[in-house]
Amino acid sequence: MMDLSFILNELGEDRDNYYNAVSPPIIQSSNFIFNTIAEMRNAMSSEFDNNLYSRGQNPTLNILRKKLAALDGAEDALLFSSGIAAISVPLLTLLTSGDHIIAIENPYSWTAKLFNDFLPKFGITTTFINGCDFHNFEKALQSQTRLIYLESPNSYSYEIQDIKSIADLAREKGIITIIDNSYSTPIFQQPIAMGIDLVAQSATKYIGGHSDVMAGVLTGSKAIIKKIFEHEFMNLGPALSPNSAWLLLRGLRTLPLRLQRSFESTEIIIKWLNHHPAVKEVIWPFNADFPQLELAHQQMQGCGGLFSFILKDSSFAKIEQFCDRLSHISIAVSWGGYESLVLPVIASITNQQYDSHNKQHQLIRMYIGLEDPDYLIKDIQQAFAHIL
Ligand SMILES: *Cc1c(COP(=O)(O)O)cnc(C)c1O
């Protein structure tokens, strides 16, 4: 891989072209002028490689595109106005009526809706499997299987998949692989080096890093990225704005630092939670009792700040009281910014729907941001004191 420092500060930056400004410019322009028709014709013949109209390429986005591709060790990247667009658009390009997908169970909620509600309208079916066991992928193969969908770890329950073995199997069978790598980012996990074809991320999370921008990124071979760009991407119009791209360029410069801090603080907080009498179980891929710890260490260089835990007294009311009592850790969806957040599964169901025997219902998801870990521990401690 290229030097990380070079990627973050130099790659793609063309400072001679913009007054030697240290910070890249926001080229807030929808279209670009040509001196001659011949020049325009040349640009129109390949919109993928030229700045013609900002639904396609834009110079500010191009700086970011080069950096994100290099971080993933990929040939090219495509930027989207949201993470879910970076997942749905490639599937619409690569799949056609009658095709079959093998996907891990419990992917990100809107990804699940894509498989369950949206793709079936086009005759595309999905088999959900427990991705912890590699053999489940082999067993689910059909003659129509065109794509394997991974999310490792997945949000809420953090099951991980043996990325390299699955990529090898898919290559052998001519099946495309795509992974949602939002949790780890290329700083902690490099799926392309393990043989995965396409890597999607919600850049809204760690890459943006400040809870102020929505974005998605997809990386892969130039041939696949170009194919997606020239068809569904240009037709559906999920382009990122230059302003948002600039926020991501700014976020990117501190990505390794922020991720390391989030990782280290999470480790401290989890060590404390593991021994707390109010806690039954903590689920985090780098926790000592994680069932797939060895695989996690093999394929991840660090672990994100998102984890879940279960209270010993896991009634609907106790979970709700605990979350309501937190005074510094806020109740909100999303993650990856400065501020630590909590999101229990019970926020998305009613008391009547709550099944106290369903472990999935009991999960309290927490994101550890960049605050002082002791400050956060004190907050969790006082909230526990109210429910014990
Ligand atoms: C947030 C998220 C997404 C969706 O990204 P958006 O930017 O919200 O569209 C996809 N996958 C995971 C794991 C996420 O956390």
Image (cartoon, grey):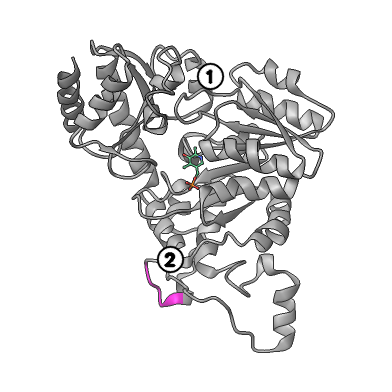
Q: Which residue is drawn at 69% across and 16% down?
A: 135
Q: x, y (%) of residue 215?
A: 48, 53
Disc 2 residue type? Answer: Asn
Q: What stretch is highlighted in magenta?
A: 18-22
Q: Name the residue under label 1.
A: 295
Image-quadrant location for residue 105 = top right
User: Split into 4 quadrants, where in the image is the N terminus?
Assistant: top right
Q: Residue at x 63, y 75 (%)?
A: 52
Cα–Cα gap, marks 1 and 2: 39 Å
Categorize mark 2 by other alpha carbons within 10 Å: few (<14), some (14-19), many (20+). Answer: some
Disc 1 residue type? Answer: Leu
Image-quadrant location for residue 205 = top left
Q: Does the magenta stretch include residue 275?
A: no
In the image, 252 versus 280, the foreground residue is 280
Q: Name the residue under label 2.
A: 243
Mark number, residue 149: none
Q: Is residue 44 visible?
A: yes
In the image, residue 20 above or below residue 285: below
Q: x, y (%) of residue 268?
A: 27, 24
In the image, 12 versus 149, the foreground residue is 149
In the image, 198 versus 67, the foreground residue is 198
Give the mark nearest the N terminus, 1 or 2. Answer: 2
The secondary element bearing badge 2 is classed as helix
